[in-house]
Image (cartoon, grey):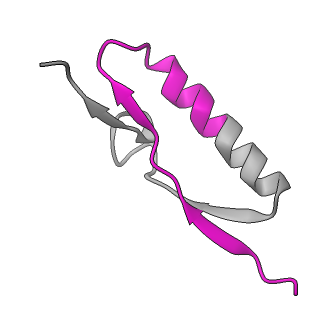
């Protein structure tokens, strides 16, 4: 079976964590899933701030 599987990925962040963590996690997740031959479905970096879902404290 050579069919590739797909997985939805949501990268979450709180407003007080550094934005770079979202950017770094995105690259690491995409690379890892590509090595495992799994297609990732996630927000694009232009859809939201860095492609992550962010909440603010409060």
Q: Residue at x 38, y 28 (%)?
A: 13
Q: Residue at x 45, y 42 (%)?
A: 45
**Residue 7 found in image quarter:** bottom right
Q: Is residue 3 magenta?
A: yes
Q: Can you say which quadrant of the picture contains the C terminus?
A: top left
Q: Residue at x 40, y 36 (%)?
A: 12
Q: Is residue 48 magenta?
A: no
- Left or right of 57 in this view: 27: right
- Most distant residue in the bottom direction: 1
Q: Is residue 21 above or below residue 37?
A: above
Q: Is residue 9 above or below residue 18?
A: below
Q: Is residue 53 above or below residue 37?
A: above
Q: Residue at x 68, y 47 (%)?
A: 30
Magenta span covers which residues?
A: 1-27
Q: Is residue 57 above or below residue 36?
A: above
- Left or right of 18 in this view: 58: left
């Amino acid at each position: 079976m050579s069919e590739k599987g797909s997985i939805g990925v949501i990268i979450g962040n709180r407003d007080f964590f550094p934005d770079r963590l979202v950017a770094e996690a995105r690259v690491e997740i995409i690379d890892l899933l590509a090595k495992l031959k799994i297609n990732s479905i996630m927000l694009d970096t232009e859809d939201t701030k860095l492609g992550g879902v962010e909440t603010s404290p409060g």
